[in-house]
Image (cartoon, coloured by chain):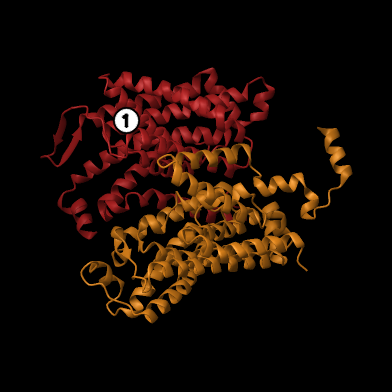
Chain colours: A orange, B red
Amino acid sequence: MMRRSTFITYAGLGLFGILGPILFPAYTLSIAYLWMMVLMASTWDILGGQMGYNSLGNITFFGVGMYVSAIIQISIFYEPGVGEYTSAMGAIKPEFTDQQYYWGIFLGIFGGAIAALALSLIFSTFMFGLRGPYFAIGSLGLAIAAAEITVTINYVGGASGISMPMFPGDIEFRSVFFYILCFTLAVLSHFVIRGMLSTQFGLAINAIRDDEDKAEAMGLPTLIYKQIGWAVTAVFMGAIGAVAGNMAGFIDKEVAYPVPTFGIFMVAMVLLGGKGTLWGPVLGAIIFHIVKETTWTYLLGWQWVTLGLILIINIVYFQQGIMGWLQSKYPEMFGIVVDQSNINQEKKES
Amino acid sequence: MFDNLQLLFVWAPIINVQVILDGIFVGAVFALCAYGLALVWGVMNIKNLAQGDFVIMGGYLALVLHSWNLPLPVILIIVTIIMFVYGWSIYALIIRRIVDKDMFVSLLATFGLSLLMQQAMNLYFGPEVQTIDMKLPVIDAFDNMVTIPYSKIISLALAGIITAAVVIFMKKSRTGQAIRATAQDARAARVLGIDTDRVYAFTFAFNSALCGAAGVLVSVIWVIQPFYGITYSVRTFAIVTAAGLGNLPGVISAAFGIGLFEKYTGMIVGTAYEVAAPVMILLLVLIIRQIHMKRNRQVVR
């Protein structure tokens, strides 16, 4: 039985998702990016908010998914493979038929997700012995290393990148197509995370966040829970990376591993909305995206300064985020029962 | 790759001298910023991701002062003072509010600061690569196989003087003792009458001044650009993590080690890997430390 406020939120967001591109056709791609950021923030929150492992390297999966999907899409229907394709860029550009393109893109998304999953399993063998800031720095190192290594691989074009196959339809249909992909993935990720958090998995990762040593002493297989958490993040990041690569039309190091932009944005969005809550990342992503698009339009040249300021002010002065603030202000709205005697005692002590 | 190895060790071993010298020059500059980071990290548990941007800011200040035809030592002193004041004000505005918070908060807040500084410098100085040309001669040694610009020698000497001054300051002066006492046990230091808030402010400002000094040297011997800061931040993090906290002499030797490693990697497998090298070192150190600690069922925290 779904609560009424939750139902209204879903109905509102769903209606916006479906009607948005119909009512504002000029902003279709912008709203598509909004759903992409919702997905990034929600998946970051599995580790960062619910599990207490602040990762700065989730963007690695995004880039790997993007590159793997490009390799699959191109080499599956073009005999000589990506290596030939990139070096012949500009000279021969193989035409893909409609059917080949759509098959390619769906296989690419799937393959990107699988590759990211495999990578996350490899990473988690040596990353989860790190705690706190070491995990954050280490995962940031992973992202930077992945970007630098990709540049040196000539097979995927090195520093000059790959230009993706042309979309067969016209430009309006193109944006609607990618919009549908982003929206579907975002909705899927939301319900997967919601479902996972409502099971024992959610309780287990919260226990890891609160006190990992005690959780382990209670007999929880913490490593497996951490691996599952990161794997889910990686699958969705890989899939959205594949979509984003096709959406951009051209991929290189800057597009695939945007560590200083999306890598940090996703953290900022979660912190803005309130970490460790289901709706915090969604709300944070929506507000952040609106602010970002407005500053990009009206404060061009100063947009980064504004973003840096938002980040600092948010973290220094407003740490619990919007949902966290609401939760402490109106706990009964969230079904949290407050023991009045506890509050009185706290008041007496302070 | 094997060609380069042969070049280094069979055909012209003299090139080793060039690589080692370059490594030492790089290491001297890294040592300054890494020492500052180690201090801030050890004393107040702040992981400053804006470290590299302090370096670049010092470089740009030096560039401005150089255009007024001031000599290098004067530039160094003025930049150090400006960066000290800047660090103090950053502490008062931002860092003071996050000192006792979750450690990840400090990473993110300083990342925001780094973003802000990068873009402010980009808007003000433009995205071009710039350098200070001291118009000093270049020494050619060993049949022109090795070139040593005078500016690098002067910078190395200056870096040595600054490091020596800092080490003596930390050992002998009352403020240095207060900083070390706070690092060991902040609560006990407070009980004994040390104003830890002032010590924190001083440490952060001191770090910023050290980075500024390093920035002056960077702008003299290499180039600066608003977005180069992050590479310095990553290197300093690698150095401090490799050396371990509270091990200040270790920080300096690790700085030279990483400088040499970076130059050798650049020489042997190509300059494209020069940026990736310190990151790889960072990851390797973290993984190796983890394996060591796992034997005792502990984790790196």
Most extreme residue toward the right is A341
How far across and how far down the image is residue A284, in percent?
A: 60, 51
How far across and how far down the image is residue B119, in percent?
A: 41, 39
How far across and how far down the image is residue B63, in percent?
A: 30, 28
Which residue is under mark 1? Answer: B217
| Quadrant of the rendered image containing residue B269 | bottom left
| Quadrant of the rendered image containing residue B81 | top left
Numbered disc 1: secondary structure: helix
Q: Please state which amino acid type lies under the numbered disc 1.
A: Leu
Most extreme residue toward the left is B143
The chain ID associated with circle 1 is B
Most extreme residue toward the front is A23
Give the camera-side residue of A29 and A135. A29
Image quarter hosting the N terminus of chain A: bottom right
Give the camera-side residue of A25 and B171. A25
| Position of A181 relative to B1 (above/below) | below
Please say whether residue B4 is visible from this viewpoint.
yes
